[in-house]
């Protein structure tokens, strides 16, 4: 049975990630109880307390899913949300929960922590990987070579190299190793056929959200570097508390812009994905370039009407497209659709002479 791996260091890091979110929410006043002490010790203690509780809850849920053999992405996204929401509600300021419920804003107030929890769950699932049975690599390689050799020896011809009854001849174009698709060795199934990137709504949502968050962080760091150079240029001293305040304020503004462009980013990532899949591209570089090109192409298609929005969405789309490639993974390319034939005479190739010339019947 396949299971998601257990890595206690990564499980603890998932908790720290949510602990950082709780501290950010407290500092910025996003409905949670504000921090009364902004000292380093108080901030670190808050991160550790919230992070440890989240990590313990998430670990318990992970072990249950592991015991049941559940490896689906939606299950880990749901686990992250289930762990995040109670903790966030416990950290809400007094009366905030009742106020949100009374004004009908409970769903929107809990939307962001739910998304953060889902992303953390998906990130752990992807980073921990899937554990299976121990592989016999040498035996698998020998089995593959035997199957490939057997496939290469089939010429589809009759005895003495002549075409047999009802068989086609391929001459020297033998099947070769590339004809080996799926095969089983020691209870483990392998696949060596053509692949394409999966289409996954959960991965698309996660990629658009992560793309927005990471691009926000990148832009915030770049803006902070520019701010520091500006202060140095005019001879002013740089105080750490000022830098933290500038970075936090900039991240809030950039984060609001990322939320505003969330749906366009999701659509642009989907456009890049389907475009790349149509031409058979599966690499990370291809998805990065596809995400980079998707936004300008959308501006051209809309004759500049979506220009300002597209400019804001370019970096999140680039980052999100690469993340989507990582989250979605690969799947086998579907085989050709079954053909329903009424007459076997119709089963000739497109360039066959029979499709170009009709039989003459003298009557």
Image (cartoon, grey):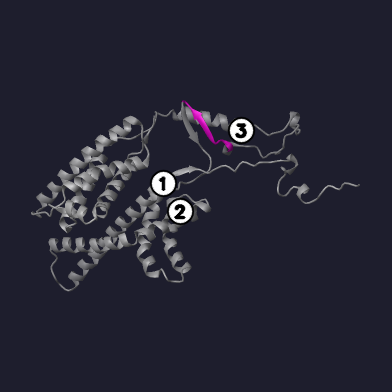
Task: Please tell me how crowded label 2 is: few (under 14), some (14-19), or many (20+) other residues with Cα within 10 Å.
Answer: many
Quarter of the image with the N terminus is top left
Q: Secondary structure at mark 2?
A: helix
Looking at the image, which residue is at 20% across and 48% down? 88
Q: Marks 3/1: CA distance? A: 32 Å
Which residue is disc 1 drawn over?
328
In this view, which residue lies farthest toward the bottom?
A: 234
Magenta range is 179-186
Q: Considering only vertical position in the picture, is 253 above or below 24?
A: below
Which residue is at 29% across, 56% downward?
213
The residue identified by callout 2 is: 273
- Taking the image as shown, residue 68 lies to the left or right of residue 144, namely left
Residue 126: percent from left, percent from top: 35, 42
Is the Cβ of the residue at disc 2 closer than 8 Å to that at disc 1? yes
Q: Quadrant of residue 67?
A: top left
Per the image, label 3 sits on a secondary structure element best described as helix
> Which residue is the site of mark 3?
151
Image-quadrant location for residue 264: bottom left
Label 3 or label 2, whichever comes before in sequence order:
3
Cα distance between the residues tagged 3 and 2: 34 Å
Percent position of residue 139, x then y: 48, 27
Dot placed on the residue nearer the N-terminal end, 2 or 1: 2
* Residue 11 is covered by the magenta coloring: no
Q: How many marks?
A: 3
Q: Nearer the viewer, residue 116 or 10?
A: 116
Q: Is residue 300 left or right of residue 15?
A: right
Work out which residue is located at the far right of the displayed protein and give it: 363
Label 3 Cα neighbours within 10 Å, binned few <14 / some 14-19 / many ≥20: some
| Image location (x, y in percent) of residue 325 | 41, 49
């Amino acid at each position: 049975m396949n299971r998601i791996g257990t890595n206690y260091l990564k499980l603890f890091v998932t908790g720290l990630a949510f602990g950082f979110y709780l501290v950010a929410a407290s500092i910025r006043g996003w409905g949670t109880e504000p921090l009364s002490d902004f000292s380093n010790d108080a901030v670190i203690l808050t991160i550790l307390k919230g992070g440890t509780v989240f990590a313990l809850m998430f670990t318990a849920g992970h072990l249950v899913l592991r015991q049941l053999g559940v490896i689906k992405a939606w299950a880990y996204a749901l686990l992250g949300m289930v762990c995040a929401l109670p903790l966030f509600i416990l950290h809400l300021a007094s009366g905030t929960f009742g106020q949100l419920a009374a004004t009908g804003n409970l769903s929107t107030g809990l939307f962001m922590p739910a998304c953060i929890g889902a992303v953390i769950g998906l990130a752990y699932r992807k980073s921990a990987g899937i554990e299976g049975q121990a592989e016999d690599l040498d035996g698998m390689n020998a089995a593959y070579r035997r199957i490939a050799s057997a496939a290469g020896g089939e010429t589809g011809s009759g005895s003495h190299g002549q075409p047999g009854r009802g068989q086609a001849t391929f001459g020297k174009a033998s099947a070769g190793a590339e004809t080996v698709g799926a095969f089983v060795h020691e209870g483990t199934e392998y696949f060596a056929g053509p692949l394409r990137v999966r289409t996954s709504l959960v991965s698309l949502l996660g990629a658009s959200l992560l793309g927005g968050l990471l691009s926000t962080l990148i832009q915030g760091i770049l803006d902070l570097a520019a701010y520091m150079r500006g202060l140095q240029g005019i001879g002013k001293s740089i105080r750490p508390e000022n830098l933290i305040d500038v970075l936090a304020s900039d991240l809030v503004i950039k984060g609001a812009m990322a939320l505003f462009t969330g749906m366009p980013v999701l659509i642009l990532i989907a456009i890049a994905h389907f475009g790349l899949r149509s031409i058979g591209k599966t690499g990370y570089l291809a998805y990065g370039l596809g995400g980079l090109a998707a936004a300008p192409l959308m501006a051209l298609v809309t004759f500049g009407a979506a220009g300002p929005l597209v400019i804001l969405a370019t970096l999140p789309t680039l980052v999100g497209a690469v993340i989507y490639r990582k989250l979605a993974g690969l799947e086998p390319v579907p085989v050709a659709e079954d053909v329903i034939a009424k007459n076997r005479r119709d089963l000739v190739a497109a360039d066959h002479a029979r499709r170009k010339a009709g039989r003459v019947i003298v009557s």
